[in-house]
Amino acid sequence: MESAGIQTMTTRELAQWQEQARPFIVVNVLPPEEWTRRHIPGSMNACVYEVTFVDRMLKLAPDRNSPIVLYGAGAETFDAPMAAEKLLYRGWTDVHVLAGGLDAWAAEGFPVEGTHAAIPDTPDELFEPPDGGYAVSVEESLVEWTGRSPKGRHVGTVRLSHGKLQVAEGALNGWFELDMRTIDNIDLQGNEELRQLLHAHLASEDFFLTSLFPTAKYVLDSGTMLRDASPGSPNYEFHGRLELRGASHALAFPATVRPFDGDPASGLEPGISVEAHFDLDRTRWGAVYGSGKLFRHLGYHLVYDLVSFQIRLVVR
């Protein structure tokens, strides 16, 4: 990937510059641990992902007219071009990007140094959860919600009571249950009277009628792995049914399933995390208060139909 104003250099041109002992610097823009693993001999390191990248470059190349060659992981990555854009924007004038990055340099047979110099770099592997049965850790799992109206929004949480997840050859199924009596508001903290009024409103027949329907349940019929997903994008598609307020309707959404590292210092064991965020139309499940498609003359009582949810489950 290339942007206007960025000069591109081939691997052979860089090798010639090195042979000619020209006055220039070569900078690896990946994290320092990646530089330690594999780097071009003589190159320095300034990680473009760090907010201190420009400060680091000021130390490496205080003369903004000095030639700089930047390189990243490979041809398909935007690491070095992004670093070049940052430098050009801040006044450096002679900035080059090594075409193809470290991958191209190594593929051409030029020398590579580091603790893993002889091991080719590979893209991040897609996480495939191990087969087996898992239980939801309710203490570490949480559902966050956001409801909106023309006047603003309310934000809160609801706790899980329990849940199960089954994995077989990458495919998922299972269920998790919410305790609707734990619906809590966050944004009104400090105004307890109004906060409790909202709690009662949400628990009433206007919304979730928790006295008759104290739980909600999502049944995951199929979780299908998206094998072309890149890191940071959803790698599963969930299809199932949401049972809420006495109604059951299909609900599908993308999800991200990844390892949960845990925290040995606090006693949290490793596991698997499942994260998702999506909107749903509350009126499909009978929570119809303030809906403009069902009532007229609502005025300031209008409440938007879509509710946003952010889910984070930890299973072991």
Image (cartoon, grey):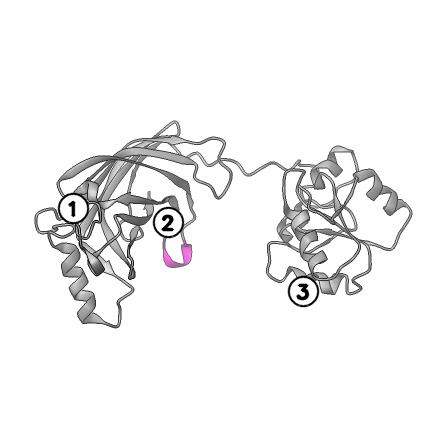
Residue 249 position by quadrant: top left
Task: Write the residue at 22% across / 55% down.
Answer: 302
Q: Seen from this angle, which residue lies furthest right? A: 20
Image check: 290 left or right of 52? left
Q: Secondary structure at mark 3?
A: helix
- Mark 2 to mark 1 CA distance (whole Å): 28 Å
Q: Nearer the viewer, mark 2 or mark 1?
A: 1
Is 47 included in the stretch rendered in magenta? Answer: no
Residue 215: image tag: 1
All told, the count of numbered labels is 3
The C terminus, quarter of image: top left
Q: Position of residue 182 (x, y in %)?
A: 19, 55
Image check: 74 left or right of 294? right
Give the residues drawn in magenta, as a range. Answer: 263-270
Task: Write the residue at 10% across / 51% down.
Answer: 205
Q: Position of residue 294 (x, y in %)?
A: 17, 45
Is 267 included in the stretch rendered in magenta? Answer: yes
Which residue is tagged 2? 269
What type is the residue that disc 2 sits on?
A: Glu
Nearest the viewer among 180 and 93 is: 93
Residue 55: image tag: 3
What type is the residue that disc 1 sits on?
A: Thr
Q: Is residue 101 above or below residue 27?
A: above
